[in-house]
Amino acid sequence: MHYLISIVGLFLVLLLGWAASNNKKKIKYRPIIVMVALQIILGFLLLKTSIGEFLIKGFANSFSKLLGYAAEGTNFVFGGMANEGAHTFFLFVLMPIVFMSAIIGILQYYKILPFIIKYIGLVLSKINGMGKLESYNAVAAAIVGQNEVFISVKNQIGFLPKHRLYTLCASAMSTVSMSIVGSYMTMLEPRYVVAALVLNLFGGFIVASIINPYEVTPEEDIIHIQEGEKQTFFEMLGEYIMDGFKVAIVVGVMLVGFVGLIALINGIFSGIFGMSFQAILGYVFAPIAFLMGVPWHEAVKAGSIMATKLVANEFVAMLDFVKVKDHLSERTTAIVSVFLISFANFGSIGTIVGAVKGLNEKQGNVVARFGLKLLYGATLVSVLSAIIIGIVF
């Protein structure tokens, strides 16, 4: 029965994307069908086969070792600040972002990441029927992050039409940066994090192809990758370490504000209505959770976590999810975990607008005007990825 419900949910997501489409006549259905099929196949391979288990185990072990190395630096600087055996969020979840940012900087400096990103993007462009720039941008956003990706193509941003700019921004909001994947793995099972990374990449193309269909001419289908100013190795390393620290601080400050505000709003709602704000949102989002494949008796709890991610961010939602996931079924845990792995929240609208505006004022204003549609599309991507997990789990 749950397979049937998930399939209904899949068609509903595609229908919601179609309803918001800029040009329904230009939608290319064949690449969409191919990519949905690929999502199901990849989801099954990753979660239900020994090959997938081997790959995810290798990926998880690699990140586990990297987090261990990151802990060496954290303990050297902050050793003694945390109680023995205590898990301090800032030290053990946010501080590894600094180390991971340094690793990404090294891979960028030696041209390893640009090579990988470029050629994976070229392969994907043959599958998704979209431009090379769009495919490059989606892969780059999943590795270097939603802000840094725009810097790499800043020479083209000022000349991009509105429809292509939307796709670039939608990719940035639908994926997550590799620099914080390790932090997610401290709260969620690595196999669900890896599955979400893969599924969101294709999900972003699917939803963008429906909401924002267009043709790219051969003359337009070029990529101008911005080369950064030549730096010495240690100049680059210092810059990436500081960038990682800024991300960790920004996430930490946002959590202080959001968690506090949500606690305040929950207190007000509990006092007036006898029910917290998150509990009310849980009932609102429960039907969506149910269509994703969550059993109905767990749909309210799942809906509350989903709503928290949308109105706050994924870290706040993960903190709440960690508290309740032991009381949820494995199926619900898998579906909700995958839903949480993206930047689809209201705060990301401002982040992306700011990133583009910093490079081109006019284009930043264009992005601001379709900000809510960006969030709508990115949320559909998260729901679609979660539904695929519901189908294959």
Image (cartoon, rainbow, N blue to C red):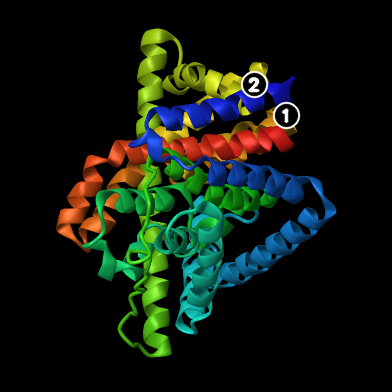
Q: Position of residue 323 (x, y in %)?
A: 60, 34
Furthest residue toward bottom: 232
Residue in view at x 39 percent, y 60 percent: 247
Q: Is residue 334 left or right of residue 347?
A: right
Crowding near pointer 1: few (<14 within 10 Å), some, many (20+)? few
Q: Amino acid at mark 2?
A: Glu
Instruction: Measuring from the top left, give residue 37's x and y in whole percent.
Output: 66, 43
Q: Residue at x 47, y 67 (%)?
A: 98
User: Residue at 47% of width from left, 18% of height from top?
Assistant: 284
Which comes sooner in the sequence, label 2 or label 1?
Answer: 2
Please give the name of the residue rendered at 54% of the width and 60% of the height, measured from the top-left corner: 126
Q: Nearer the viewer, residue 110 or 66?
A: 110
Q: Secondary structure at mark 2?
A: helix
Left or right for 279, reference 71: left
> Which one is nearer the viewer's eye here, 190 or 51?
51
At mark 1, the secondary structure is: loop
Mark seen at residue 101: none
Give residue 168's position: percent from left, percent from top. 37, 54
Which residue is denoted by mark 1 in the rendering? 329
Q: Position of residue 45 (x, y in %)?
A: 75, 50
Using the image, determine if residue 74 lies above or below residue 38: below
Instruction: Identify the residue at the far left of this view.
Output: 362
Reply above or below: 186 against 386: below
The answer to whether 19 appears left or right of 382 in the picture is: left
Residue 149 found in image quarter: bottom left
* Contact check, label 2 and label 1, Cβ < 8 Å: yes
Mark 1: which amino acid? Ser
Query: Which residue lies most toward the top here?
Result: 273
* C-alpha gap between disc 2 and disc 1: 8 Å
Residue at image mark 2: 298
